[in-house]
Amino acid sequence: MAEWLGKALQKLLQRFESARDLTKLPEDHILRQFFFNSIFYMKYSKWLGLIVYLLLIGVCFMPWTYHADLQKFFTGFYSQNNVYGRPGKYFIIFSVISIVLMMINKVWAKFTHLFFAGVIAAYALKTYHLYASSYNAYTPEKQWGLYALVLLSILSFGIALFPDMKIKDNQNKG
């Protein structure tokens, strides 16, 4: 009975001329749908991930902080007397592993990629805290490379969180 009433009401509504406009999509809705499909469903996540990881590797060579008392820039590979270590080396290793795992189309690779992206994000936050913290009542001047490091590592985690993978349904329907 309810189904019959619903169909009858739909037929009555479709008699009006404005009801035909409900099936058309406005241009801004089409643009929003394209943006939603390409970004949120990560249709191009492998390419976007490749770009993010290559930028992350490049950021390791950029200046992260400037220390006016030493008159030197610190990067991912240089700090005075190697006091902060060389975190750029680990970012490059983890980024290359993540690129390889991102290209493998297996479920175990996606979970392992998520793990490595989480390690990269956590290590980037730790590195940010290490490089930006004060010592001997002196605070170094943060450069844009340090901010880019944190932003790209969080983006890499987001890419790993939403992989582009179709999972086949192997269950028997019967």
Image (cartoon, rainbow, N blue to C red):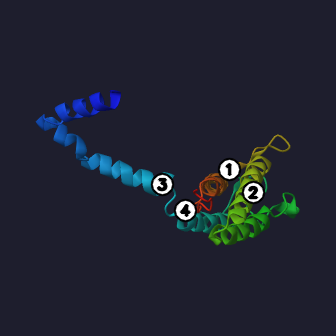
Looking at the rendered structure, the kind of residue marked 4 is: Ser
Location of the N terminus by quadrant is top left
Q: Which residue is mark 3?
A: 39
Report if the CB atoms under discs 1 and 3 are less than 8 Å apart: no
* Element carrying mark 2: helix
Viewer can see residue 75: no
Sequence-first disc among 1 and 2: 2
Q: Which mark is residue 45?
A: 4
Q: Residue at x 73, y 69 (%)?
A: 97
Sequence-first disc among 3 and 2: 3
User: What is the C-alpha distance between the residues marked 4 and 1?
Assistant: 30 Å
Looking at the rendered structure, the kind of residue marked 1 is: Lys
Q: Total label count? A: 4
User: What is the C-alpha distance between the residues marked 4 and 2?
Assistant: 17 Å
User: What is the C-alpha distance between the residues marked 1 and 2?
Assistant: 28 Å
Point out residue 58 in the picture as x, y percentages from the top left corner.
64, 68
User: What is the C-alpha distance between the residues marked 3 and 2?
Assistant: 22 Å
Viewer can see residue 57: yes
Sequence-first disc among 4 and 1: 4
Towards the viewer: 92 or 71? 92
Looking at the rendered structure, the kind of residue marked 3 is: Ile
Sequence-first disc among 4 and 2: 4
Report if the CB atoms under discs 1 and 2 are less than 8 Å apart: no
Point out residue 56 in the picture as x, y percentages from the top left corner.
65, 63
Q: Residue at x 67, y 67 (%)?
A: 106
Q: Which mark is residue 142?
A: 1
Q: Nearer the viewer, mark 1 or mark 3?
A: 3
Looking at the rendered structure, the kind of residue marked 2 is: Phe
Q: Which residue is mark 2?
A: 115
- Callout 2: 10 Å neighbours few (<14), some, many (20+)? some
